[in-house]
Amino acid sequence: MNVRDATFSDIELICDLLAEAFYDDVLIESAFPAPERRREALRSFFRIYAEVALRKGGVIIDENNVGALMYFHYDSENITDEILFKQLRDEYSADYATMAYLMHKLSAYHPTIPHFYIFVLAIPGQDRGMDVINALMYRLIHLQDQAGVPCYAECTAARVQRLAGRLGFKPANFKLCVDGFPELYPILREPQKALI
């Protein structure tokens, strides 16, 4: 399966795909409890992050446009979480203030050294195939190894944390609990040296 790096012309596709994939997610339901507003709120929420990710990381999508992986490359001169948090708090509803709170709390668990951060990996509905997930992840792992930095993420389920182990991720050595939200399962992958 082929994947590609998304561009700004893919923003609508990315937002639609992510809003669909995360509509029923337990973490998202905690932040956006009103189902009648959730889909549009998610589209706007993911737009904020997609616009930053396309400048300070990337979004990888598969050839059939059914899966997306959004990541950020954190380093000393790159992304500023405070800008994202301010946008979430100031520009939108109280729901966004809840997400800004969560994102701010989660950022405290990030590695303190330069790293890649998987913000979301999504394949909506019935398309949740391992071939799509693997293709997206292998592309990110290749970029991570080239950059020579760790990769960090939070999983919403312990089974996802275990599946990530097949790709070289290890459970982080801490529990991740934010008041008012379900427990998350953090993972970390160290960069691998390419074989010559």
Image: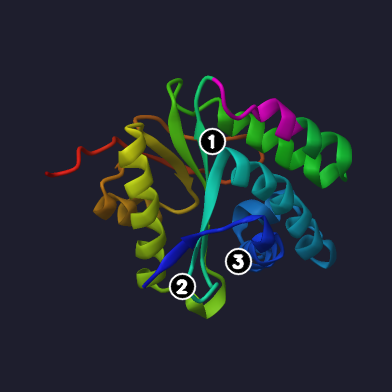
Is residue 161 visible in the rendered image? The answer is: yes
| Front residue (pair 143, 153) | 143
Amino acid on which the number 1 mark rests in the picture: Cys
Would residue 118 appear left or right of 42 to someone viewing this image? Answer: left
Q: Earlier in the sequence, mark 1 or mark 2?
A: 2
| The image quarter in which residue 163 lies | bottom left
Q: Write the start and end of the magenta stretch as one range.
A: 77-85
Residue at figure coordinates x 39%, y 38% from the top left: 151
Residue at figure coordinates x 66%, y 37% from the top left: 102
| Front residue (pair 1, 67) | 1
Q: Is residue 79 in the magenta section? A: yes
| Front residue (pair 131, 61) | 61
Would residue 30 appear left or right of 118 to someone viewing this image? Answer: right
Callout 1: 10 Å neighbours few (<14), some, many (20+)? few
**Residue 177's disc number:** 1
Q: Is residue 76 in the magenta section? A: no
**Residue 21's disc number:** 3
Q: What element carries label 2?
A: loop
Is residue 181 visible in the rendered image? The answer is: no
Callout 3: 10 Å neighbours few (<14), some, many (20+)? many
Q: Name the residue under label 2.
A: 128
Residue 128 in the image: state x and y as whole percent.
46, 73
Q: Of all residues shown, which one is farthest toward the left?
A: 196
Cα distance, mark 3 to mark 1?
A: 23 Å
Q: What element carries label 1?
A: loop
Residue 187 in the image: state x and y as whole percent.
38, 41
- Judge depth for marks 1 and 2 and give the one in front: 2
Cα distance, mark 3 to mark 2?
A: 10 Å
In the picture shown, does residue 143 fall above or below 107? below
Q: Which of marks 3 and 2 is nearer the N terminus?
A: 3
Amino acid on which the number 3 mark rests in the picture: Ala
Residue at figure coordinates x 45%, y 37% from the top left: 116
